[in-house]
Amino acid sequence: MRRHRESLGRPGRLGLWTLFRFNPHVLVVLATVLALFYIAREAIPCFIFWHYRSTYRQVDFVMDTANENEGYPYARGVADPGGEEWVMSLAKTPAGYVVESDPTVGFAPGRRIRVWVSDAAFNVGYGKGRSTTIAPVSRFPTLPGLGRLFAWAGLFVVTGLAGMWVAGRSVFRPRILGTETLYDTKAPEKRE
């Protein structure tokens, strides 16, 4: 393992010996990966909505009960027509429970909310109470299609390439930091 010495003042006077050298481009790479995670989080459900688009139908979700579920409340209800039981994420507010994916809709037993449902689609939750199997029509008047999928995929590619380009710029190259290793071939020159 190589040891690195980073200058802490005038070169040659005082040095800090470390086992690892910090490279600032790592921060750019981590920021890029974080941005790509959130873009992928939106792109994957768009693919599911597009791929299973023929299985989605609009029904009324009739709320029956709200369950606390250790801090993650949800509403149980049935789809009308159909009678299948479904669950929808809720959020707790000072006024009571609201539908997490559409906070304008409050929970009340017997209340009807128009939703998109699919029995065939994969159940993928992607933040803020959103799910690929049940989604309020008020939040999604039309299901995300191929256009939105391509937009997210394009943004993913552009963000990834831009992040790697910025990380590769000479500003972020470690040789600019003026670090020296213990195993340099040429000894540092002494100043008089």
Image: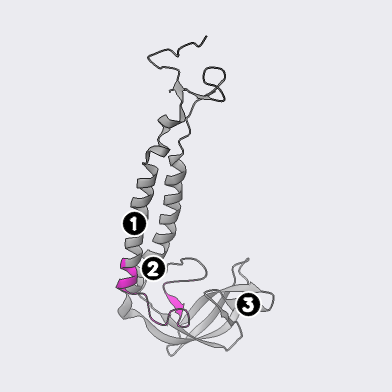
Please give the count of numbered marks on the rendered protein. Answer: 3
Taking 129 as reference, is 15 above or below it?
Answer: above
Q: Which residue is found at the position 59% from the left and 68% from the top?
A: 72
Q: Which residues are magenta?
A: 130-150
Residue 39 is left or right of residue 110, and the answer is: left
**Residue 172 part of the magenta segment:** no
The residue beneath circle 2 is 45
| Residue 166 appearing in the image | yes
**Residue 145 part of the magenta segment:** yes
Q: Quadrant of residue 182?
A: top left
Taking 47 as reference, is 1 above or below it?
Answer: above
The percent position of residue 95, horizontal first and vertical second, equals 68, 79
Residue 20 is left or right of residue 185, and the answer is: right
Q: Which mark is residue 24?
A: none
Query: Of the residues tagged 2 and 1, which is closer to the observer?
Result: 1
Q: Quadrant of residue 176?
A: top left
Circle 3: residue type: Tyr
Query: Of the residues tagged 3 and 1, which is closer to the observer?
Result: 1
Q: Main secondary structure of the magenta part?
A: loop
Q: Which mark is residue 158?
A: 1
Sequence-first disc among 2 and 1 = 2
Q: Quick one: SS at disc 3?
A: strand
In which quadrant will I find the N terminus?
top left
The percent position of residue 33, horizontal first and vertical second, equals 42, 51
The residue beneath circle 3 is 97
Mark 3 → mark 1, Cα distance in angstroms: 39 Å
Rate crowding at label 3 as few (under 14), some (14 to 19) or many (20 or more) other CA atoms within 10 Å: many
